[in-house]
Image (tube, grey):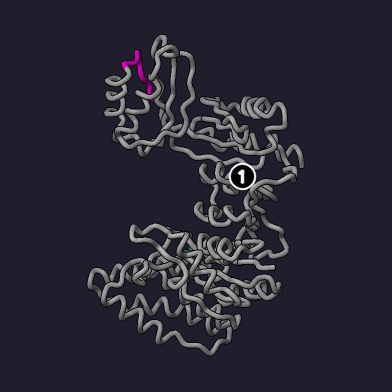
Amino acid sequence: MIKVVKFGGSSLASAEQFKKACAIINMEEARRFVVPSAPGKRDSSDTKVTDMLYQAYELAANDQPFNDALKAIKTRYDEIIYGLGLEISLDYEFKKIAENFKVKAGKDYAASRGEYLNGRIMAAYLNREFIDAAEVIRFDDDGLYDARVTEKLMRKRLEGLDGAVIPGFYGAFADGRVKTFSRGGSDITGSIVAGAIKAEVYENWTDVSGFMVADPRIIDNPETIDTITYKELRELAYMGASVLHEEAIFPVRKEGIPINIRNTNAPEDKGTWIVESTAQKPRFTITGIAGKKGFCSVNIEKELMNSEIGFGRKVLQAFEDYGISFEHVPSGIDTMTVFVHQDHFMDKEQKVVSAIHRLAEPDSIEIESDLALIAVVGRGMKSTRGTAGRIFSALAHSNVNVKMIDQGSSELNIIIGVQNQDFETAIKAIYDIFVMANL
Ligand code: ASP
């Protein structure tokens, strides 16, 4: 059995955290391939090494002295090396980094050194082979991740190895220039390695015991989700629930490999399983609740709209013309409402309004701002009657006025629009009725 294990920045922020991570790795022989992040924050006031590297490179790019900034980064690593009792030195590596900064090797190169160096330390501590991600993860000339070439390179390189450490977050173009994924991208690397070697499981170790049913900033100590499908996760992530990089799903999903989110600080917790499909009944009717504030609704009215062919297209054309993507479009007989992100829409609103008038000739347009959208997601909703009824009676009891309702035809989610000020109350009411009442 092969498991790929990825450890996030907070799991590797200090020697102490490193020891926890490596104890977890050594606990199971199957945990053969390890993908580390760069050292993250040791406490809330700390700075991630990745951010320190960006800042240091910014100095170099502007021809300002950057040696002190690099020294501070080296100290972070030296503390880890010392704490682990290792004999290695990063003097040579930092000399090379300074040289490359001088010739302006690029922001991506700079940021990638965070995981590169952490990988070096981890490989030494675990006594496993180090594989530079630049060798095995490839980007094409347009800067897009090249799955076909990467899979080939990765399989060939890892073939026959008992184990290895492959740093997260970056890869390279064919000519060797380093390129990173977007922030949080070590999750993607872990998924790519797991997919390429067809691992049984991709374990993603972080500082929480999996996905929570609701945002812990709103709900005190929310329950953890045992099992979630990729589709449910997508719905929740889109609405702001984030533990895993969005692009980390595809490489493992394609191979039918489950992801297990685990907590380095509580390894006995089972965490959350992310799977394609499952016969396991969810613990509650709903799997999760997530939401975002800051939406506007554009309400368009026109008599006999329902019989006018092409009306919807013309309205949406106005949004497209100004590069605004829409979130939801609930409609009535003679009304149609378009939900958009307030901050994308604000400075173009009058232009969009006149474009709608020009293209679709409506009777009136009304804009409402400061709205929030809440997604109630769950594969269990399909086979349960009364879910929508329960949501709305809970909201009514909490004095929340519902502005919009949208149920996807998959019956996987119900989207509710409320005023920003009712957002937290609404989430609490929904959590209480489905989770608290069923504990
Ligand atoms: N170190 C990178 C970041 O801070 C990548 C990662 O941790 O996944 O974004």
Position of residue 421 relative to residue 179, above or below, is above
Viewport quadrant of the C terminus: top right
Q: Residue at x 57, y 68 (%)?
A: 11
Position of residue 272 relative to residue 386, above or below, is below
Residue pointed to by mark 1: 214
Identify which residue, 90 or 166, lies in the foreground.
166
Where does the image place residue 321, in percent across and percent down from the top left?
A: 30, 32
For residue 107, side relative to residue 195 (left or right): left
Return the residue found at the far left. Answer: 63
The magenta segment: 361-367
Viewport quadrant of the N terminus: bottom right
Return the residue found at the far right. Answer: 439
Badge 1: residue crowd in 10 Å (few <14, some 14–19, many ≥20): many
Q: Is mark 1 within 8 Å of ligand 1?
A: no
Tell me the kind of residue under disc 1: Ala
Q: Residue at x 31, y 23 (%)?
A: 356
Identify which residue, 220 or 38, lies in the foreground.
38
For residue 435, side relative to residue 14 (left or right): right
Where does the image place residue 323, in percent across and percent down from the top left?
A: 32, 37
Q: Is residue 142 magenta?
A: no
* Image quadrant where residue 257 sits: bottom right
Q: Residue at x 53, y 90 (%)?
A: 87
Position of residue 11 relative to residue 371, above or below, is below
Where does the image place residue 283, in percent across and percent down from the top left?
A: 74, 43
Where does the image place residue 418, in percent across and percent down from the top left?
A: 52, 30
Q: Residue at x 67, y 50 (%)?
A: 224
Position of residue 304 relative to residue 22, above or below, is above
* Image quadrant where residue 33 sits: bottom right
Return the residue found at the far top. Answer: 304
Element at label 1:
loop
Q: Is residue 365 magenta?
A: yes
